[in-house]
Image (cartoon, rainbow, N blue to C red):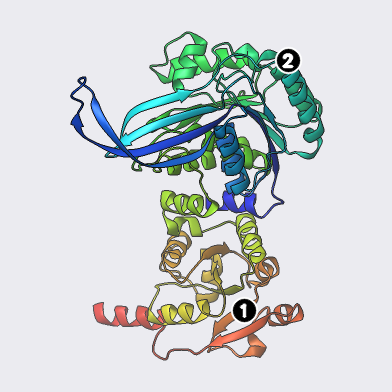
Amino acid sequence: MEALLDRCLHRRPPTVLVVGDIMCDSHLLGKVSRVSPEAPVPIFESGEQRRTLGGAANVAANLRALGCEVQLIGVIGTDVTGYRIRDLLRQQGIADTWLLEDATRPTTEKVRLIAQQQHVLRLDQESRHPIDSDLITQALEYAAALLADVDGMICSDYQKGLCMPELIKPLFAMAQAADRPILVDPKKWDFTYYQGATILTPNLKEVEQASGAGVDSEEALEKAANTLLHQSQARALLVTRGKDGMTLFHPPHAPLHVAARARDVFDVTGAGDTAIATLGMAVASGLSLSEAVYLANTAAGVVVGKMGTAVVSPQELRTALRSEEGFHAGKVLQRDALAAALLYHRQQGERIVFTNGCFDLLHVGHIHYLQQAAVLGDRLVIGVNDDASVRLLKGEGRPMIAQEDRSRVLAALACVDYVTIFSESTPLALIDLIRPDVLVKGGDYTLETVVGRKEVEAYGGSVHLVPYINGSSTTGIIESIVQHYR
C-alpha cells in the first residue's frame, strides 16, 4: 500500500478545485467541576480556544497537506470569523483570492465546548438561506476561469446555501466539458441534485435518508446504493461506514469493501473531509478508484485520532500504511512499485544502495554485510534470487527457504528499505531499472567480477566491496547441521 502513496507523490502535484460551504471550527477547552446555583446546569470554566478550517476549507487544507495545489471557491461573511478564515487559509498556503463575501450573512462557525476531553455543548453561528444570484454568477465566473488548469474538482455540500441547483448544474456541466472528475460529499436527501458527478461519498446515515430504505444488511446497502447511483447518474458511490470502513459501489464491478483499521478514535469531526480530499488527490494523481479508496480509508483512520478538524500529512499516511500491512510486508515490492518508490526518494535527494543475493538461511555474516551496505546511502534495496535461479546457482536441494519467506525475513531488518525478487541469472536487468548510486557486493568478489559494475560507473555511480566474514556461510551451516544430526 505504501507504493500507492509513492505513485501519487512522485508525480507532478495535482491541482484541485474545491467548491463548497466554508466554516470555522472552534474548540473551546475548559473544565467543569461544579453545577450552577442559578439553574441545574454545569458551569464551564473556559480556557484555551483553538480554531481550524472546517467544511470545504478543511477539504482544501487536507489537499494542501498532501502536496496538492488548491483553488477554493466559497462564501464567507464580512465579520471577524471571515477574516480568521482568510488568515488560516494563508497559513496553509491556500490563496483566498476566490472567496466570495456576503455582508448579509454570518460566516459559519461551530464552537465546541470541551471539558476533560468530553464535548459539553456546541454553539453554531450560520445561515442556511440560499446565496444571492449575483454571488452564484460570480462563483461560476471564478470556476470557468479555473477549471482549465485543474486536475479535478471536489464539491463539499454542507447545506449552508451555496450548493444550490442554480450553481451545481452549470458548474458540473463546465467540469464535464473540461473532462475533469467531480467528487461530491453530499448532504441533500435528493441525489438528483448531483447529476453529473463522477463519485459521491455519502456516509451510511445519508445513504439511508436519501434512499428511503434501511441499510441493516449488505444486500440492503447494495440495493440502496444502486438506487442512489441511478438517481445521480454517478459512476461510483463510496459509502463511508465509520467503524466498519468503506464500501465502493462501482458498476459493473463487484462492490469493494475496505475494513476500518483498529485505532483509538478521539474525534470523528472532519473525517469525511479527509477521506474525500485523499480520494480526490489519489484520483487526480492517476490511481485507479479502488486504489484511491484504500488510501482514503487509511487517511480517515488517522484523522479520527486527532481532536477536531485536522489534516493528515504524507508521512503520517505513510506510517499508517506501513503499520496496516506490517512494515516488513510493505517493503517487498514488485518492480513497477519499486521503481515508483525509488523515484520519489530520489526527488528527495536520497542515495540508493543496491545489493543482491540468495540469502538462504540468514546468518550473522549476512547481517554484518547488510548493515555495512546500509550506511553507504539513504535507502538499501535488496534483489533476492527466486527459487529457480538459486537452484541453478547452488544445486538441487537449495534453497532451504522459499523466496517469499526469504524476502519477508530480509524486509524485517531495520537496515533494509526494500526487497524485490528477480528470476534472471544475473541482476543486470534489475540494476538497469534501479540505477543505484552505490552497488555493493561481498569481499569474496573482486571489482572485475561484479556484475553491473561497468553500467553503474558509466552513469557516475560507485561499487563497494564489504569485507567477507570468514566462517559464516549458508553452505557451512547446512553441512554442520547434517553432520550434527547424522
Residue 266 in sight: no
> Relative to 444, does residue 486 appear above or below in the rendering?
above
Label 1: which residue? 439
Residue 35 in sight: yes
**Residue at x 39%, y 18% (from the top left corner):** 217
Q: Residues within 10 Å of mark 1 (few under 14, many from 20)?
A: many
Q: Secondary structure at mark 1?
A: strand
Q: Indicate which label's residue lies in the foreground, 1 or 2.
A: 2
Label 2: which residue? 133
Residue 147 position within the rendered picture, expressed as x and y whole percent measured from the top left: 78, 33
Residue 183 location, quadrant: top right
Whole-number angstrom distance, CA of label 1 to CA of label 2: 65 Å
Judged from this view, the residue extending furthest toward the front is 38
* Residue 472 falls left or right of residue 166: left
Q: Residues within 10 Å of mark 2 (few under 14, many from 20)?
A: few
* Residue 76 falls left or right of residue 297: right
Q: Secondary structure at mark 2?
A: helix
Q: Of callouts 1 and 2, which one flags the residue occurring earlier in the amino acid sequence?
A: 2
**Quick check: marks 1 and 2 in contact, CB under 8 Å?**
no
* Residue type, numbered disc 1: Leu
Judged from this view, the residue extending furthest toward the top is 212
* Residue 38 falls left or right of residue 225: left
**Residue at x 43%, y 82% (from the top left corner):** 368
* Residue type, numbered disc 2: Ser
